[in-house]
Structures are given as C-alpha cells and as structure tokens.
Image (cartoon, grey):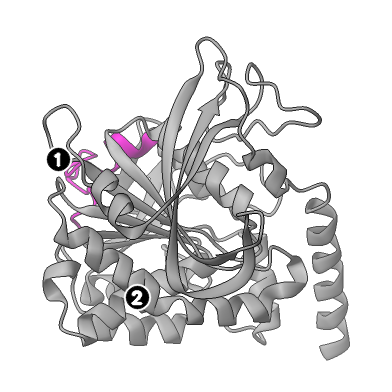
C-alpha cells in the first residue's frame, strides 16, 4: 500500500507540474501606456512580507517588516467572470489584464489611502491572503479579478506572504506562512484602527486559510477582541488539518458573523495535501452531508458551505472560490435564501448557483442541490 500511495502521489505531482508550465512572471507588473477603451481599472493595495530586489520587484525572500505597494490593473472589456485573461506574448489591454501603474508606498501613505473616504463615506475593506504555490504576479492579478467581478465598493488589499511559487516548495511555503503570522495580525490591527465602513472581510485561500486562522487566533490570545469584532473571516479550500482547525477554532471562540469555510469534496489539490500528510483530512474537503460535521459546526459557530456545484476551469478544482466573486453581494446578505441562512448562520450548507443561495442539506433530506 505505501508503494501504491507513493505512485499515485508522484502521478498527481507530475500533473501539477505540467499545469504550472508557462506561468506569469514579474514582467507583467511592469507599467503599460494605458488601458483600453471600455476596460475597468482596479486599484489593488499590497501589504507583504516579501522582500524587494534591487529592481524593486518583490521576491520570495522574507521580510520581517511589512512592505507596501499600490497597483492599478486594467481588466479587458470582454473579461469573463472568474477568469484572468493572461497575455501569451505582448500584453494587449484590449484582450488581457495589464498593469497601468505600480507604486511603492510607505506605511503612512498606505494607511491614509486605504482608509480615505470615497464618495463622502468611509470605505469597506477586503483582505485576500493567497495560497501555496502562488507567485506575486498571480496573487496581484487574482485579487484584481475578484474585485472586478464582485463589483462592490470596497478597497481590495492583498496580503502577500513569500511563497516560493513552485510545486516543490510545499514545506518552505508552510514555513513562510508561519513566519508571516505576526505581520498579518499587525495588518488587521492597523486596518481595524482606521475609520472604515462595516466589517473587514478577510479571505484566506488554501494554505493562506491556515495563515488567516492562525492570525485571528493570535489576535484573540493577545486580547485584541476589538479587532476581531471588525472581521468577517472566509476560508476558501483551507489546507488545514481537521484536528488543528478544531484547536484553532476553540481558541478563537465564536465570531459574529460566523467564520465561513468554503469546501469541495472533489478538491484534487487537497487530496495531494492529504497524501503528503499521511491521509490526514483537510478542512477544505469536509463532507457537509455528514451529521457529525453539522453538529460540530453548530457547536463551534462555524459555517461550512459546499461549493462543489460551482463551475471551475481549474483542473484541480482548488480555485472554485474565484468564481464566487460575482455572486458575493447576494451571497453575503443576511437571509440570502428562503430559510434565512446568510453569513450570520452557523451550520453546514450547500451553495446553489441557481439564484446564488445557501441551502441546508439537512433541511433537504441530505440531497445536495446541483448547479446548472
């Protein structure tokens, strides 16, 4: 059996390596002349534990101090929700995501700009914490895509930890997220101290979900309850051991609104993670139809949402969450469905792409609603 498991793991890793061929490099963050007519320009703010090289580019080297930047990303007129239209040669603003501006910022300027009133009102804030095997360019363009698709009046902020951006960097990435816990907690504390509108949405993907949960745990242990009250925590396909997550949630305590966890039972990337962890189940693959999951989530005041019905172009079914951005305004409402299950209700649910609603599989005799 060990040899069989090892063979399967090698095959899956080989597929991952093939899928990562031709990935975008830092040159795509170089400024272009202008966006195309009809393009949408998204301003992305960055707080990162990555170091800059001599050319000012962020690398996978680690920085104890947070570094800050601002990028303006142009989204092409024919952009399809959930996609990043990557250039295959010279970037074309009419067809591709392009960078129209990038600026290094100091801490004071970053603080001032993200909290600046917009339309006479304090802004909403959304923080995205990317996952394993993600390079800096991919992280910047991903948050720009989600901000454009969500079309909400909130400031997108990327927390970029120093991922190696390689399949073989799993262990190094795990160390890098551990290294970045204090800095993410410090960023959230800074944002919560500013005059902004409503909760601060924090979305942690994959290994970034572990980092997000650890940072919130650290805030609770440090007595930063006022900061935690500002947070709306969403974990997408979290690469977290189930037992570790239980320990984290116990330390954090109930959140209002409840912590939301987006899961997919067929997530291939998390299957690989489970094999690497000698079959220890990951939170991102929990079965919401299991009565034990329902009971545990209600006791912990956590909301588990199965998003397996959401279509994905990712062959490893690990990035389904990016397509949810277009549904976000309705998905995040209290009472988003007929049973009143919005982000303020704990339990186990299934996301139904028809009408963008949450439905309890236990209220539906255990039958999962399927998308179109």
For image coordinates 81% across by 67% down, the residue present is 13
* Residue 200 percent coordinates (x, y): 24, 54
Total marks shown come to: 2
Image coordinates for residue 305, horizontal then vertical, percent: 38, 56
Asked whether the beta carbons under mark 1 and mark 2 sit within 8 Å of each other, the answer is no
The part of the image, by quadrant, that contains residue 231 is bottom left
- Which residue is labeled 1 in the image? 122
Identified at 84% across, 82% down, the residue is: 6
Q: Check disc 2 and report its element: helix, strand or loop.
A: helix
Answer few, some or many: residues within 10 Å of disc 2's Cα (few below 14, many 20 plus, some between 14 and 19).
Answer: many
Q: Which residue is mark 2?
A: 215
> What residue is shown at x 33% (from left), y 52% (from top)?
110
**Element under disc 1:** loop
Considering depth in this image, is 350 or 363 the residue closer to the camera?
Answer: 350
Classed neighbour count for the residue bearing mark 1: other residues with Cα under 10 Å, few (<14), some (14–19), many (≥20): some
Does the magenta segment cover residue 270?
A: no
Q: Quadrant of residue 290?
A: bottom left
Q: Residue furthest top?
A: 37
Disc 1 versus disc 2: nearer the observer: 1
Query: Looking at the magenta stretch, what is its main secondary structure?
Result: loop
Q: Is residue 157 left or right of residue 142?
A: left
Nearer-N-terminus badge (1/2) = 1
Residue at x-position 24% and y-position 39%: 337
- 337, above or below 21, in the image: above
Bounds of the magenta segment = 327-345
Query: In the rendered image of this protein, does residue 175 appear above or below residue 117?
Result: below
The front one of 96 and 299 is 96
Q: Which mark is residue 279?
A: none
């Amino acid at each position: 059996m060990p040899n069989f498991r090892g063979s399967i793991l090698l095959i899956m890793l080989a597929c991952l390596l093939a899928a990562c061929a031709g990935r975008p490099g830092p040159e795509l963050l170089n400024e272009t002349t202008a966006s195309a007519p009809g393009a949408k320009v998204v301003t992305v703010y960055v707080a990162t534990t990555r170091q800059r090289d001599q050319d000012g580019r962020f690398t996978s080297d680690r920085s104890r101090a947070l570094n800050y930047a601002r990028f303006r990303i142009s989204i092409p007129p024919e952009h399809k929700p959930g996609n990043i239209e990557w250039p295959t040669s010279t970037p074309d603003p009419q067809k591709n995501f392009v960078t129209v501006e990038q600026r290094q910022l100091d801490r004071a300027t970053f603080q001032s700009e993200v909290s600046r009133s917009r339309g006479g009102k304090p802004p909403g804030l959304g923080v995205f914490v990317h996952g394993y095997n993600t390079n800096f360019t991919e992280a910047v363009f991903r948050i720009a895509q989600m901000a454009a698709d969500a079309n909400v009046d909130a400031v997108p902020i990327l927390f970029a930890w120093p991922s190696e951006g390689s399949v073989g960097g799993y262990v190094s990435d795990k160390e890098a997220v551990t290294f970045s816990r204090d800095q993410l907690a410090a960023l959230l504390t800074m944002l919560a101290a500013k005059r902004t509108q409503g909760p601060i949405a924090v979305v942690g993907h994959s290994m970034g979900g572990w980092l997000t949960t650890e940072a919130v745990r650290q805030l609770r242990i440090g007595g930063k309850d006022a900061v935690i009250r500002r947070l709306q925590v969403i974990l997408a396909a979290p690469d977290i051991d189930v037992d570790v997550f239980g320990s984290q949630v116990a330390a954090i305590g109930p959140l209002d609104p409840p912590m939301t966890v987006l899961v997919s039972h067929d997530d291939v990337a998390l299957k690989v993670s489970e094999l690497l962890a000698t079959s220890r189940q990951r939170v991102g693959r929990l079965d919401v139809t299991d009565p034990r999951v329902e009971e545990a989530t209600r006791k912990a005041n956590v909301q588990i949402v199965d998003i397996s019905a959401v279509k994905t172009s990712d062959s490893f079914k690990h990035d389904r969450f990016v397509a949810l951005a277009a549904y976000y305004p309705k998905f995040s409402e209290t009472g988003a469905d007929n049973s009143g299950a919005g982000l303020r209700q704990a339990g186990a649910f299934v996301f139904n792409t028809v009408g963008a609603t949450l439905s309890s599989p236990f209220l539906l005799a255990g039958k999962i609603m399927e998308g179109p």
